[in-house]
Amino acid sequence: MTSNEIRSAFLRYFEQHNHRIMKSSPLIPKDDPTLLFTNAGMVQFKDVFLGLEQRPYQRAASVQRCVRAGGWSR
């Protein structure tokens, strides 16, 4: 399978189990000075978690672009 086929299969599975499919958030979040970049797939839900917004669904799935930053030491 290609990576696109794997992503599509992942999303289809969750859609078949009553999840709302969400678009990926941008790598550089818009209108949010508290975030430098998207480091996990939850940016589009931040206001929901903070209690600032309610959504008409309870389950969601996405395939999120993200930046994984890290380092190592000796």
Image (spheres, rainbow, N blue to C red):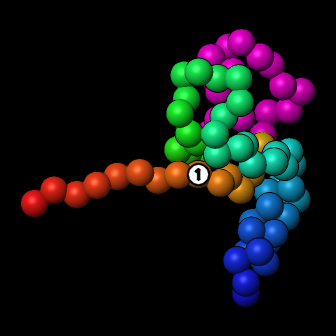
The residue under the point 80% across, 61% down is: 11
Residue 61: image x %, image y %?
75, 49
Q: Is residue 70 left or right of residue 73?
A: right
Residue type at numbered disc 1: Cys
Dot 1 surroundings within 10 Å: few (below 14), some, or many (20 or more)? Answer: some
The residue under the point 89% across, 27% down is: 56
Q: Quadrant of the C terminus?
A: bottom left
Q: Which region is colored magenta?
A: 42-59
Which residue in the structure is indicated by mark 1? 66
Instruction: Report the front residue among 40 and 19.
Output: 40
Relative to 28, say whether 35 is above or below: above
Q: Is residue 42 visible?
A: yes
Residue 52: image x %, image y %?
71, 12
The residue under the point 82% across, 46% down is: 22
Relative to 7, say whether 24 is above or below: above
Residue 71: image x %, image y %?
28, 55
Residue 5: image x %, image y %?
79, 78
The residue sitting at the top extreme is 52
Relative to 38, say whether 34 is above or below: above
45 inside magenta stretch: yes
